[in-house]
Amino acid sequence: MSHSIAASIYIIEEFALIRQLINNLVKSLPGYTIVGRSASLARGGEACLRHKPDVVILGWNLPDGTGDRLLRDVAPALPGTRWLVVTPQESSEAVPTAIGLGAQGVLVKESDPATFRQALARLVGGGSFYCPRSSRLLLDFVRNRTRSNPDGLTDREVEILRHFAAGAAPKSIADLLRISVKTVQNQLSSIRHKLGVQETADLVRYAIRIGVA
């Protein structure tokens, strides 16, 4: 996206008050334009296919279903669109589901405006953003699931991948496992090589798919 053109934003949220608050917050920021708002999956999906926005702000719980439907059915048809999912804080399964289906950003509704602005800027810039609470929800999900090691990953690599996918930095992983940061970095490089991926979001999605995240 050219920096001279405002990033287009579409909002899908059930509750009118929250929808309006998100609208007002986005409009208060330079460099963004809102191309539409919807309160349902059906209307939101149709509008997104028509407008092809740069970012969709997607409330998870809607009158006609949950946000995973759009991530499955609509997102693949919009490769240039990035998805920022906003989920209730208590919805622990929504976070790994959203990330596993390709959402580039996840916020809980309790997130403050500064965190929202940071997430929006990160997605528009081509990156990913998962708020601290969503990372903790993902870690809880990780701890409750175990699977065998696929794709030739060693036990140590799976352990490192599990912590990394939950949002832990290499230094934190090194301290937790009592190994050097260099060892963690080497293991992450080995994981990327074995899986044929480079992006952090791809590693997170892979970890979710195999059940270690």
Image: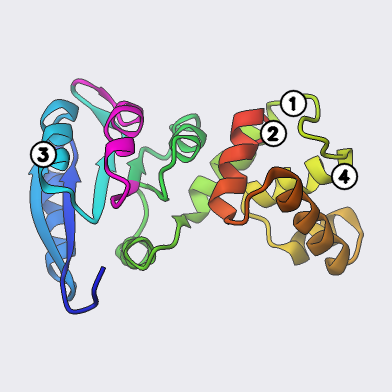
Q: Which residue is mark 1?
A: 146
Residue 51 drawn in magenta: no
| Residue 7 rendering spot, x and y as whole percentages | 20, 65
Q: Is residue 133 left or right of residue 190?
A: left
Mark 4 nearby-residue class (10 Å; few <14, some 14–19, many ≥20): few
Residue at left offset 36%, top offset 60% = 123
Residue in the picture at 33% in, 68% down:
121
Q: The residue under label 3 is which amino acid type? A: Ala
N-terminal label among 4 and 3: 3
Any mark on residue 47, and which?
A: 3
The 10 Å Cα crowd at callout 2, few under 14, some 14 to 19, many 20 or more, is many
Assess whether mark 2 and mark 1 are in contact (beta carbons under 8 angstroms). yes
- Contact between marks 3 and 2 (CB within 8 A): the answer is no
Name the N-terminal-most of marks 1 and 2. 1
Q: Pinpoint residue 140: horizontal percent, then vertical percent.
A: 63, 36
Q: Is residue 83 magenta?
A: yes
What stretch of residues is rendered in magenta? 64-84
